[in-house]
Amino acid sequence: MVVKSRAQLKHEKAVVSLMKVSRKSKLKAKKAEKKKNNRDRHEKKKQLFKTEMERGREGAPDPVAGKRSSKLEGVLARLAVRKQRKAKAVKAGKGSGTVGARSASAQVPKWTVISKHGARRHKPTWHHFGKK
């Protein structure tokens, strides 16, 4: 039996470590594959919807196809409505809190800018005093 030199052993160890795949890279690869599959699936759906609309098949007699197109139209309508609406600011003393909370919020004065630095001043750290 031949005894291997240190260089040979080191080389074998390096080859084995190169073949190993870390847990994180496995997860990343799996996620990348999933993302690619979902992207392809979504593109197919979009293409199918476009071809149906181009062919004038908005309300297809096929019940499954009809459900799919009506669902998509509903989603698009909801998105359009959501973009139009804008939330109004809640006035002081109004809102869905308790009666006491509403009255307390109405009595609090309006907030004014005090800090010149745009945020609250933090307590100085030990690093500030020269300690690590």
Image (spheres, grey):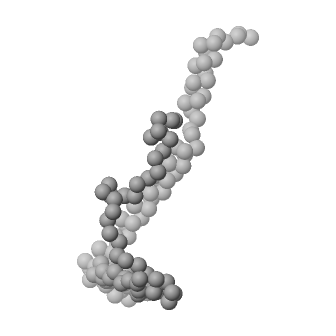
Position in image of residue 93 (x %, y %): 41, 86
Residue 61 visible in the current orientation: yes
Q: Which residue is at the front of the view, 94 or 113?
A: 113
Position in image of residue 123 (x %, y %): 47, 51
Total marks drawn? 0
Q: Is residue 7 above or below residue 127?
A: above
| 49 to the left or right of 33 | left
Who's the residue at 41% across and 83% down the image?
107
Q: Which residue is at the front of the view, 115 or 95?
A: 115
Who's the residue at 44% across and 62% down the image?
38
Q: Is residue 101 above or below residue 128?
A: below
Residue 62 visible in the current orientation: no
Return the residue found at the far right.
1
Q: Which residue is at the front of the view, 40 or 105?
A: 105
Who's the residue at 34% across and 76% down the image?
110
Who's the residue at 36% across and 84% down the image?
91
Quarter-wise, where is residue 15 in the image? top right
Position in image of residue 85 (x %, y %): 30, 82
Q: Is residue 99 above or below residue 2?
A: below
Position in image of residue 17 (x %, y %): 58, 30
Q: Is residue 77 above or below residue 37?
A: below
Query: Can you say which quadrant of the picture contains the N terminus?
Result: top right
